[in-house]
Image (spheres, coloured by chain):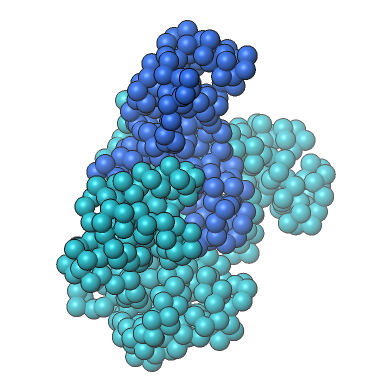
Amino acid sequence: MTGQLALKFPLTSDATFGNYIGHAASKIRTIKTLAYLWGPTQSGRSHLLQALCHEANDNKRSAIYLESLWEYEAELFNGLESMSVIAVDDIDTVIGASDWELALFHLINAVSDKQGLLVVSAKVPANQLAVDLNDLRSRLSSAVAVHTDWLSDQEKLQALQKRAKFRGFTLDDDVGHFLLDRVPRNMGSLMEVLGRIELETLNQQRKATIPLVKRMLGL
Amino acid sequence: MSSSVWQECLRSLESELSARQFNTCIKPLQVVSDSKLVKLLAPNKYIKDQINDQFLSRIKELIAAGGDKEVLLEVGSTQYISQEQNNAFVERESFYPLLDLNKEFTFDSFVEGRSNQIARAAAVQVAENIGGASYNPLLLYGGVGLGKTHLMHAVGNSILERNPHLNVAYMYSQRFMEDMVRAIEHGTMADFTQYYRSVDVLLMDDIQFLAKGMKSQEEFFHVFNRLQEGGRQVILTCDRYPKEIEGLEVRLESRFVWGMTATLEPPDLETRVAILRKKADSEATEVPHEVAFFIAERIRSNVRELEGALKRVIANARFTGREISLEQVRESLRDLIAIQDRQVGIENIQKTVADYYKIRVSDLHSKKRSVSVARPRQMAMALSKELTSHSLPEIGDSFSGKDHTTVLHAVRRIEELREAKPDIDQDYNNLLRILTG
């Protein structure tokens, strides 16, 4: 049987507040200036930042989401204050590099002058970041801090089901529990597997079932 | 170009590029078009260059497939276009200070204490006597988050209130440098220079960053001289005394300090409490005294972090619908307090004080009564009271079982000496800065 060609469409495009489970979403939406979002890897920081940008775009406001900063030069930050919303993921990956620290410091000042919204994210609280530039450290420490949520397995299941529904397929409880028992239970891994299930169901034109998932995962 | 053509273009690019490339370079693009031209506006030059190098030919292909032909990529934002009501949008190249004074930064909203009263008095003096020789320039310096920018804006706001016709320009040094580079690139250096030399009051924040550019230093030197010659007021802030700025030209160093220099020190406990209560008032939020005291005892290094902590407490209270209380504050600031408590302990204070006075830690624990040992011991006890949450008996115990009345005596003695002897006051402030910096 020839499988239907599934379009590649990154999961991140539907990272919205609507399909985020937890309190951090409501907190971050109330912030108007500078926010510092922190939490461990795969705890939903990227999701929240992207959701912030999607919401801004929906409201006809310009927004930019930046990740993998190490792939770029610090000039990436120059002049970004012209955007209404700036979301910068994983700033801890460039903290310690003087050009990046200085660029971030100036971006914070410039955004503050323009009364824009800047949200930066990192794995640890601001006061545990090894920032060399004192001016930057104090600005990050004064930002409104938001901690990502620690989800229970039940909440993770809800998050998966919400996301699946948004993508147009159903993830039954038994399949969800099966995933939680068999794959790493951080949201990043779970979402990655969910993306593969979506492609598989589209290719196979079948429902998401335990046998399908087992086959897909080679279990 | 219809918006559907651009949406189609976005869909194709999203499927072809990595999420990182798409999010960083493509998604933030803003589009303006007319019947002949599609203009893509990138947020900055760096992103524009990335697009030029990697994605522009593909974008052009996709747009051409939708029926449009000419594509132009520029730095800009539709916000500026609507402001100018001009379709012939040009790359933003204005070097005129677009920075507004923060209206909330006034003398009234500035909490005065022993740590900043001279700086405040000097700032008021300048606001009332613009361009007076003995206060020109006014240099406000001190660690981060102690209120330098607040005072600077307060001067600007006060001057404008009295003299609305004056041209008061607020700028930070990095922006001065960026604008200058842009002016050089666009051949508008003469306008740039002319602008700065024509202001009545120049407020330049964070001058330590000027040290990074020789050309900027030279230009600022000339601007500075011209303003001084014309009796215009210059106010500068810096995070350290200019002599300590590596890379700053000697001629600028000397000019920066030839008027009035005033330092801002970390605020003492009473001032920190007053700052929190004032900030809470401005947020129309009730913060009980014991809560303000609790926060002020733990966040000691600077005002910005103090206010940041209060913002977190207020945000948390609003979000959870709980009243602000000690328990709620402990929960909101859990991570912050854990770090602070770990960083400043009595042992750390003893070691720092012993190093500072070049004696041994064991001397602090001894019963020696010579001034060379007793004074540092009293200093360490006073700092332990100021910087930790330990009770007086606990502090006494940490000094080899001294009585709590000894600690109390030490604290009072240091207070008296700080009033009477500037060198003791300076030692105290230096140690405070070392321990909380």
Residue at point 57%, 62% (across, down): A99
Quadrant where the C terminus of chain A lies? top right
Question: Is residue A7 or residue B335 the one in the foreground?
Answer: A7
Can residue B166 be seen here? The reply is yes
Q: Is residue A45 above or below residue B331?
A: below
Which chain is represented by blue in the image?
A
Residue that lies at the very extreme toward the front in this rendered image:
A1
Residue B162 placement: quadrant: bottom left
Residue positioned most to the left? B85
Instruction: Report the residue at 74% width, 38% height from top.
Output: B399
Instruction: Give x and y (percent) for residue A88.
Output: 46, 47
Instruction: In the picture, one chain is cyan; tell me its letter.
Output: B
Q: Quadrant of residue A206?
A: top left
Q: How many marks?
A: 0
Residue B230 point in image, percent of width and height: 34, 91
Horizontally, residue B221 falls left or right of residue B378, namely left
Which x, y percent locates residue A218?
62, 17
- What's the residue at 32%, 75% (across, down)? B94
Q: Residue at x 34, y 49 (%)?
A: B9
Q: Position of residue B239 (x, y in %)?
A: 53, 65
Q: Is residue B86 above or below residue B144?
A: below
- Residue A117 as seen in the image, left or right of residue A95: left
